[in-house]
Image: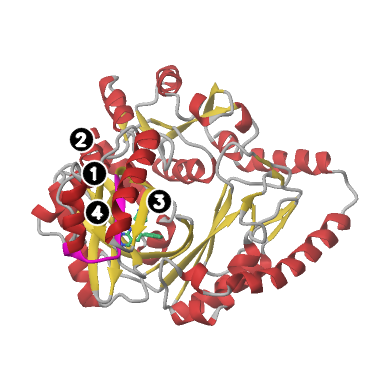
Amino acid sequence: MFKKVLISNRGEIAIRIMRACRELGVKTVAVYSDADANALFVKYADEAYHIGPSPASQSYLNMDNIIRAVELSGAEAVHPGYGFLSENPEFADRCRAEGIVFIGPSASAIRSVGSKVEARKTMEAAGIPVVPGTKEGITDIDRAVGVADGIGYPVIVKSSAGGGGIGIAIVHKSEELPDAIESTQSVARSTFGDDTVFIEKYLAEPRHIEFQILSDSSGNTIHLCDRECSIQRRHQKLIEEAPSPVMTEELRAKMGASAVEVSKTIDYENAGTVEFLYSKGDYYFLEVNTRLQVEHPITEVITGVDLAKEQIKIAWGDELSYTQEDITINGWAIECRINAEDPLNNFVPSPGKVKRYRSPGGPGVRVDSGVYAGYTISPYYDSLVSKLTVWAQDRSEAIERMKRALFEYIVVGVKTNIPFHKAMMNSAAYQSGELTTHFIEDHNILEDVERLSKSEKAKGESLASALTADDKKIAAITAAVEAYIHQKQ
Ligand code: MV4
């Protein structure tokens, strides 16, 4: 096994990966920006290297500085986590050129799905269902209108290099299509430096269902079942669950086989996710995420597989520890992303100092976080406070357990979306399991959030005045406690 791994990421996911390393007996190296000098993940690591100023472009995206830290530390491998350089084929290539193991797929596998047009073509040729649409990037607008007229409206224009909902347009009639193509091309050009766009039939209220896959260097590939990720706002997932409420054994076998086929088609190695849209009993390939995902814990708790450890073992060259037959689903998992943001003000980020903090515990509760009392959430990065994952025997028990965990959760000093999650768990529509990617707009969740935010605010005020010790002292004490827990061994 590797002796030392560098984690080119920050926050909760850096800690998640370091936990896997510690269990494998692997030493860890953190890299950090100015803003993260006091972050928990830096304390957790066996050693840490400063890689630049706070903006990600100068630190967590700075390949030269990260590779220098790998060399200085003597780490043999880099785990990129999610975001930042995790899906950057250039970084994967550079690591390999320097003799550093990149814990993830090959640069060529990343490239082969980086272009959505190419990925669609590849998967269609391999017999994977794709949404009806254009075969190639659009070069001739009149021809594109002809194709769209044939498919029938509404259609969706998508950027080939896109992702995260940037550079898409929904078009309801033929006359609107030429303008939509041109504006999507222009957004794609300025955002991604590639103006290739394509057209698909627009599915009105689909579900977003994804399959976790694992593939080793000996050609063994398995899937670890499904996650339902439909609850999102502006393409930011907020709640994920596993399995999907619509999944049947029959559908899982079909979609799982497709996910494995996708992996084999692109010679994929390591952990990955195959995303599908699901509508009215049919499923369609959407894209491949070539990284460990934010929502991986829900798969871990229902399958018992430690995905971060499997990734490291695969990169070392080990064969998978599991066959497909070994993978079974036990119970139900839900993850709420607890963000420092204001659900009553358009979910705007609410960075700042966390004055009081107590995370929930007890049966079936897992908290992945990089936050402690006295820690300041920086405006430079995402606003994730933690991922709150519950496990229970079934979906309704998982919802009750999530309500209980949200009730126990105390975060004072920054606004959080905890009231939003409470409203969701109490929503009859959510409880029914009838989820779509438009759930939040389609249901009156925010009304409930208003009421629940008032009680959250009252709790915060009473707790803020409950202690008289000044905040600096609390920060010093809790930082010392964390440093002790995470002390170098
Ligand atoms: C779609 C779609 C409906 N029909 N494609 C949005 C971002 C990109 N990753 C794919 N997206 C969608 N593609 C067809 N043919 C609806 C969406 C979509 C969506 C997809 C997954 C999760 C959330 C979403 C929210 C709005 C729209």
Give the secondary structure at mark 1: helix
Residue 199, disc:
4
Earlier sequence position, callout 1 versus callout 4: 1
Q: Which mark is residue 108?
A: 2
Between 218 and 264, the one nearer to me in the picture: 264
Q: Does mark 1 have its CB less than 8 Å from ligand 1? A: no
* Quadrant position of the N terminus in the picture: top left
Q: Residue at x 27, y 52 (%)?
A: 287
Quadrant (top left/top right/bottom left/bottom right) for the C terminus:
top right
In the image, 83 versus 282, the foreground residue is 282
Q: How many marks?
A: 4
Name the front one of labels 2 and 3: 3
Q: Is residue 398 left or right of residue 325?
A: right
Q: Amino acid at mark 3?
A: Gly
Labels 1 and 4 touching (C-beta < 8 A): no
Q: Say which residue label 1 marks.
A: 113
Q: Which residue is mark 3?
A: 165
- Residue 279 can be seen in this image: yes
Name the residue rendered at 76%, 68% in the picture: 454
Question: Is the residue indicated by label 3 positioned so its CB lies within 8 Å of ligand 1?
Answer: yes
